[in-house]
Amino acid sequence: MNKANDVFMNTYHRLPVVFTRGEGVRLFDASGKSYLDFSSGIAVNCLGHNNPALVDAIKKQAEKLIHVCNYYQSDVSEAFAEKLIAVSGLKKLFLCNSGAEANEGAIKIARKYSFKKYGKNRHRIVTLTGSFHGRTISTLSATGQDKFHENFGPFTEGFVYIPPNDAAALEKALNDISVCAFFFEPIQGESGVIPLSADYLKKAAEICAQKDILLIADEIQCGLGRTGEFFACNRFNLTPDIATLAKGLCGGVPAGAVLAGEKTADVLEYDHGSTFGGNALAAAAGLVVLETITANGFMDEIKEKGAFFADKLDDLELDGFDISRIRGAGLMLGADVSHEDHGLLEKALEKGLLFLGGGPKTLRFLPPYTITREEIIEGISILSEILPKTA
């Protein structure tokens, strides 16, 4: 750990642990201590650690072909793209390496679509306060949180922030003739697992359809089956014009995707690219993820385990612990505690449990989809030891 501080830039508040291997829902540190992982590398290790099918596919692909540039095609990359389009219900995609890159691609598609159709003055994108869309200059500009903006300006102009779930603010913003897109996370992860309501998203979709404003769903954290539907939007029978994916898309191999519907499928024409995006190794891993999560009953099981997890969290509240406001869907759950600076991440680490924060008072849980009910109970038991009692 001391060596790491000598070579890495000071960009992360790292907890005092060094992991050396993983197995299923567990990570193991250098001393061999076991930890239940309720974070999945921030929703990345969706099939758990050292998943046999995933490891096997990566090994076999590495022995054949790791990378070929996108001036050519590879059999596995094409198979992955075809599967992803079939599952998503959208029309075409662009493969990249991360969520920020996927969101950059979505922004470029939206602006080019509007520029070609309406001219240069229709370029503004409405996003939400509390949103998080990435750490590049443009995706930071799209992010509606002041704390991410400090020291990095000037930013890409043309983004407008409105409060989530505020129908009046939504209608006012989308009536601006300079707006080309509404960009949203169906469930905001970084600001506290804040779901957008069905009525709010329905209204957004209606206004966008009427005014030819593109509806862009950032599904990077909440998509890919995490809520029990492939897209979190699917819970409300909503089909976006553009959707972005990353995080667990290839089970831990870096990957991202911009998926476009009928309106936007052919907007990009030899004017965007990526060196590594959709390479053979990532595609081989991504095929395993897609085949696993689309297997019969798999996403229903995510919903069931998520409901079980939420019930167990609610039991903690009933037992007199200082926890409240459980929210989310499937295996993306958040629960608020009453005080900031509670040190719960550190206390949980000592007891062998990993989870995330989501804003100053929110505990965020993003376990692997393969988690069992017994492992949920085990993690909840550790929470019960570290949460402060109200009585």
Image (cartoon, grey):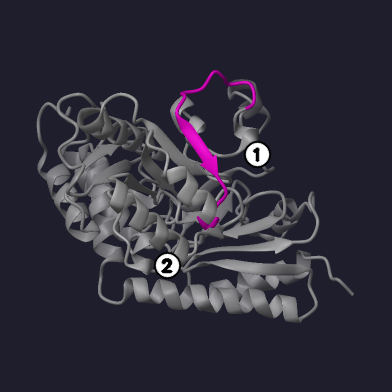
User: In this orientation, which residue lies closer to the viewer: 324 or 211?
Assistant: 211
What numbered label is drawn on residue 370? Answer: 2
Point out the residue furthest to the right here. Answer: 391
Instruction: Indicate the amino acid at tag 1.
Output: Arg
Q: Is residue 166 magenta?
A: yes
Dividing the picture into quadrants, the one containing residue 166 is: bottom right
- Mark before the other along the chain sequence, 1 or 2: 1
At 22% across and 36% down in the image, what residue appears? 279
Q: CA distance from mark 1 to mark 2?
A: 26 Å
Instruction: Indicate the amino acid at tag 2.
Output: Thr
Residue 231 lies, in percent from the top left, at 35, 59
Residue 217 showing in the rendered view: yes
Label 1 neighbourhood size at 10 Å, few (<14), some (14-19), many (20+)? few
Residue 364 lies, in percent from the top left, at 60, 58
**Horizontally, is 76 left or right of 210 in the view?**
left
Q: Magenta: predominant secondary structure element? A: loop
Look at the numbered disc 1 and give the secondary structure of its residue. loop
**Horizontally, is 97 left or right of 149 in the view?**
left
User: In this orientation, which residue lies closer to the viewer: 377 or 176?
Assistant: 176
Q: How many marks?
A: 2
Dividing the picture into quadrants, the one containing residue 238 is: bottom left
At 25% across and 75% down in the image, what residue appears? 296
The residue that mark 1 highlights is 14
User: In this orientation, which residue lies closer to the viewer: 99 or 372?
Assistant: 99
Dividing the picture into quadrants, the one containing residue 183 is: top left
